[in-house]
Image (cartoon, helix red, strand yellow):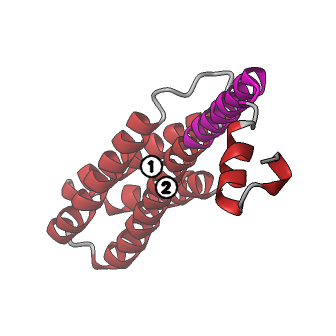
Amino acid sequence: MRYSQTPGPARRRRCRSTVKPPNRGLRRSRRRALMLACGIVMWQVNRLTRVVTDLQMAHARVRTALEIQRDSTQLIATISQLLPLEDAAAFETEVSPLLDALRTSTANLAALTADVTENDAEYAVLARVTTSIGSVINIGDTMVRKASAGQWPSVRVRVGVLVREQQQVAD
């Protein structure tokens, strides 16, 4: 019986057995291409991870800076409300916690910016904010001491200096 006269199933079997095995060189090149693609994907994922980490750090810095601005604004509002009363005890009990909150926020900002070097673009801004908020805290402490001593004219004079320093923080 000739090949062309074989029945259907036998014919199919014979055709399968004559199929050549796939080219091994093609398998290797596919494997290499797949490994290269995996390497590129891993590299891109690592880059994205670094960018996300940087954005999270920037978000934490901005959040802390906004807390500082909010606390310093609240300090000025509280001082402005208490100044006409000239009550030393109320002044101290209201202003001291706000100064403590500013100290805490400043310490948090310092911890978040510990890795910033002088070459970074944000270094100048952070240094200015840190200096200004330190001045706000020192002026507030002086105002509490002067208010406790009953030196209200001295406290009133320092309000203008406090506002100027707080404006530098806000800018």
- Percent of width and height locating residue 51: 61, 42
Residue 27 against residue 106 in the figure, above or below: above
The secondary structure that most of the magenta stretch takes on is helix
Q: Quadrant of residue 75?
A: bottom left
- Residue 49 is inside the magenta segment: yes
The mark closer to the camera, 2 or 1, is: 1
Asked if residue 87 is among those painted magenta in the image, a careful observer would answer: no
Q: Position of residue 161 (x, y in %)?
A: 53, 53
Q: Residue at x 71, y 60 (%)?
A: 7
In this rendering, the answer to whether 82 lies above or below 107 is below
For residue 117, side relative to residue 12 (left or right): left
Q: Quadrant of residue 72?
A: bottom left
Circle 2 residue: 162
Label 2 and label 1: CA atoms lie apart by 6 Å
Q: Are dots 2 and 1 in contact, CB under 8 Å?
A: yes
Which residue occupies 20% across, 53% down?
A: 149
Magenta-highlighted residues: 21-50
Q: Dot 2: within a 10 Å radius of its alpha carbon, few (fewer than 14), some, or many (20 or more) residues?
A: many
Depth check: give the residue in front, 40 or 60.
40
Residue 150 visible? The answer is: no
Task: Identify the residue at image location x=76%, y=26%.
Answer: 23
Q: Amino acid at mark 1?
A: Val
Asked whether, in this view, residue 23 is left or right of residue 70, the answer is right
Percent across and percent down for residue 70 are 45, 65
| Image quarter (top left, top right, bottom left or bottom right) of the C terminus | bottom right
Marker disc for residue 136: 1
Q: Secondary structure at mark 2?
A: helix
